[in-house]
Image: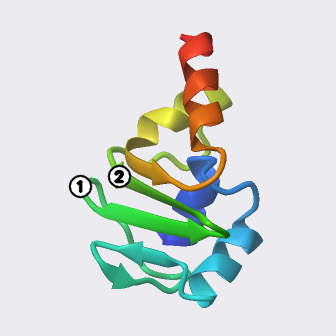
């Protein structure tokens, strides 16, 4: 699956065009290498996203074409998240569980 489609399907990014723009700007890497929008990802790959002052690193677990909102989170495992707003996001996840 292409990295731009993975980012959209997993809901790490809201729109595929935004995912493409991030990749074209060099803000997405796969396994430590800068990725273009068409870079293929597979389960086990480590994807790093840098937007604004925030960096998110995830491990690809599954590839699903059009998952429901509830199952989109099953596509990846959050390895690290740094930057503004991280504490608020963690608190929100704790409240949902």
Q: Residue 91: in sight, yes or no?
A: yes
Residue drawn at the location 39% of the way across and 52% of the way down: 58
Relative to residue 1, is residue 4 drawn left or right?
right
Q: Who is closer to the viewer here, 89 or 72? A: 89
Q: Does any portion of residue 68 appear in the rendered image? A: no
Q: What residue would you read off at disc 1? A: 44
- Identify which residue is drawn at 61% across, 44% down: 66
Q: Is residue 79 above or below residue 3?
A: above
Q: Is residue 60 above or below residue 77?
A: below
- N-terminal label among 2 and 1: 1
Q: Quadrant of residue 5?
A: bottom right
Residue at 51%, 35% in the rendered image: 73
Q: What residue is pinned by disc 2? A: 60
Percent coordinates x, y for residue 28 in the rendering:
50, 75
SS class, disc 2: strand
The image quadrant that residue 83 belongs to is bottom right
Q: Position of residue 40 (x, y in %)?
A: 39, 74
Instruction: State yes or no: discs 2 and 1 in contact (Cβ < 8 Å).
Output: yes
In this picture, residue 35 sits left or right of residue 6: left
Specify how the rendered protein is coloured. Answer: rainbow
Q: In percent of the image, x 64 and y 52: which residue is there? A: 84
Left/right of residue 31 with respect to residue 3 in the rendered view? left
Question: Between marks 2 and 1, how big is the CA–CA gap?
Answer: 5 Å
- Asked which secondary structure carries label 1, the reply is loop
- Is residue 82 found left or right of 24 in the rendered image? left
x then y, percent, for residue 72: 55, 37
The foreground one among 12 and 94 is 94
- Farthest residue, direction left: 44
């Amino acid at each position: 699956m292409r990295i731009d489609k993975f980012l959209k399907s997993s809901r790490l990014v809201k729109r595929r065009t935004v995912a493409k723009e991030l990749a074209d700007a060099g803000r997405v890497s796969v396994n430590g290498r800068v990725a273009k929008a068409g870079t293929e990802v597979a389960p086990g790959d480590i994807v790093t996203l840098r937007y604004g002052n925030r960096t998110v690193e995830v491990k690809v677990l599954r590839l699903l074409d059009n998952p429901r909102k509830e199952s989109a989170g099953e596509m990846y495992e959050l390895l690290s998240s740094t930057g503004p707003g991280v504490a608020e996001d963690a608190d929100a996840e704790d409240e949902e569980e």
